[in-house]
Image (cartoon, rainbow, N blue to C red):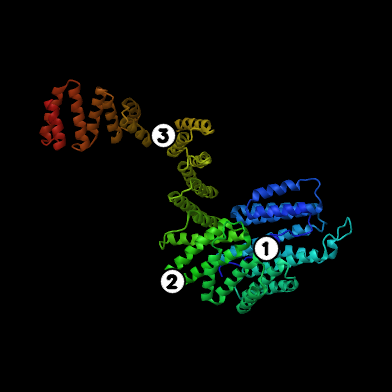
Amino acid sequence: MLALLFLIVVVLTQPLVCQAAPSLSYDADFVKTLREMRLYRLGESYLAEKLTQDDLSDKASSELTSAMVELLGEESLCTSSDKQGDISDKAQRFADEYLKTHGDSPFRIRVLLALAINGVNAGELGAMNVQLLPGDEPTRQAALTRLRQTDEQIKAQLQILNTPSNAIDPKTNQKVFSDDLWQRIKNQTAFLSARRALAMAKCYPAGSPEYSDCVVQANAELKPLGAIPSTDPLCWQARLLRVRAERMSGDVQAAQSALAFMLEQQKPPMEMLMDFQAEKLYALMSANRPAAIKTLSELERSLGDSFSNADSTDDAAHLAVLDAYVTLEKEAAARGDKNEQKTWQSKASQWAEKMRLYDSGFYARSAQQVLAAMAVKSLEESETGNAASSQAPSTIALAAENLFREGQLQKAIDAYLKAAEKERLSSSANEENVFKYQYVAAAIAHKLDDHVQAAALFRQAAIDNPNNPKAAQAFKTALFHAGKLVDVNKPETAERYSNMLDEFLKTFPDSPDVNLIRQQKQRLSEALKAIPKTPAERLSEAQTALKENRPKDAVALFTPLAKEFPNAQDVQIGFAEALSAANADQDALAQWRKVAQNVKQYSPQWYRAKYEVASLLVKTGQKDKAAEMIRLLKLLRPDLGGTEWSEKFEKLLTN
């Protein structure tokens, strides 16, 4: 199977202690609703305000803290990978703050249990990544590390739970929890431990000693839970997990028999029916493919309308359908059946996108990981010319996020830019997304200290989306990187930077940084004046003045060059052209004669110089001298240099 089986334990959706005061039960239920709606910021604000109250009892503080820890734990699973660590650390800080002030309180078991729930959920997600990225050893080691840490947390809990004195309130010397409730908490902890063990198994090859040991451990944790009354929701959770453990141990027939008995004879609670249907699909996928495909079709139809209803009871079934699609797509690819592969891939992509948008916790995150893995594969195929990426822009962005997390930064940049381009060309293009993808690509270049690429990407994001509130800031960041590239020994770099400053002023005239940019441009201009220009730059500047019909400026620029480089034809000819354009006839006449003396005789430049001399003689009233010069030239070269020049010379004589 591609991904792990996930099952949210009942403690995620029900208060741990039923005897909590009504106001506290209201708080827990309210935050649970906010979690289902993914209103994490609102839930955090609500709980943070409650926790600042001075008159909080130990019991109230423990329940509010555990609710905060679970809220942040679930948020970390739904958010982008670069933010997960910060959110998880925040949850740990809330827990540590409570444990620091209530270190001897029996109520601390609630907070510890919430931490264990977060650890198991994150560990299962990590194990799923191992399945999505086979051979990626860093991902596998990260998942194993998280699951081992969670194992230590659970062992610490069990140590407390197995010490009866920890259920005594030291102030009243009375039991805080009833014996029945204390046992329920122990059962919930054991159930978490079994989930952790099965997730751990998925980090090892099926059938390996480590894999088998983990499954055996899960079975050992689940066995005592068989005594739980069927009226307790945890009973059905444990039964379902035992079926899973049987299937993972290779006894698919026993798993199917147990499922059939529970579905047909025992009738699980309605809210768990889809969980059992999901497990049935997994079992059939392992043992009876035709029956599995039939069940998949039935389950798909029954679940099709369940998205967006803020009900998490179908999430496990959603994941089972997705895993089946992905498994069938991989099998079709192995057979070389391109059409069938494309069909299953399309179904998987559409289904995962719905899960990413509407499911909760790591179910949404697992769908996001599937989409990312598919997009990475699609991008790789498009790079090798095997296929064009057909993924949606948001999916390509998920692939880019995965590439970034794996340290493939340049590939991540390229993927984000592809996502931006696809979004721009989409019929329902979202300009905010275009800017976001381009901006993140630029930010990765910034991380790489690639000033050339970062300057270009930040600038492009700003120019393509000038109305975005962050566009001016993006351009400022581009200027920061471009400024790093300015080299006083390479004036062209300063010129490019100056052009970017002008572009900022033109594109963002209302920016509060306009005056700052103008001052920067002024300082740059002054600095450029102090930098000696190269001869090539000076010649280019003089030629530009001549082309722009600024003859006086051209003469001023050419004059020192002509003295410094008396043998440079381009300089001497340019100087003569500038003098002619400035109507400095006598000086121009002398300069053209000088050119004629220094260029190769009878070359195009020589004929041109002779013609300019004759023209200036005519212009200055010396037509006889011009005619004498042309006649002499004609004796030496009867063709006068060819049709072009002979016609020009003849025209001078006849005017």
Label 3 to label 1: alpha-carbon separation: 67 Å
Instruction: Place residue 359 in its image quadrant.
Output: bottom right
Res. 336 mark: 2
- Crowding at label 2, few (<14), some or many (≥20) Cα neighbours within 10 Å? few
**Is there a contact, CB below 8 Å, between mark 3 and mark 2?**
no
Kindly identify which numbered label has been placed on residue 459. none
Q: Earlier in the sequence, mark 2 or mark 1?
A: 1
**Residue 551, placed above or below residue 466:** above
Residue at left 73%, top 67%?
232
Q: Is disc 2 placed on a helix, strand or loop?
A: loop
Residue 227 shows in the view: yes
Answer with left or right where residue 433 lies relative to residue 78.
left
Q: Amino acid at mark 3?
A: Lys
Q: Secondary structure at mark 1?
A: helix
Residue 79: image x %, image y %?
60, 54
Q: Amino acid at mark 2?
A: Gly
Q: Which residue is mark 3?
A: 533
How many angstroms separate mark 2 from mark 1 (CA)? 38 Å
Q: Quadrant of the N terminus?
A: bottom right
Which of 624/11 is in front?
11
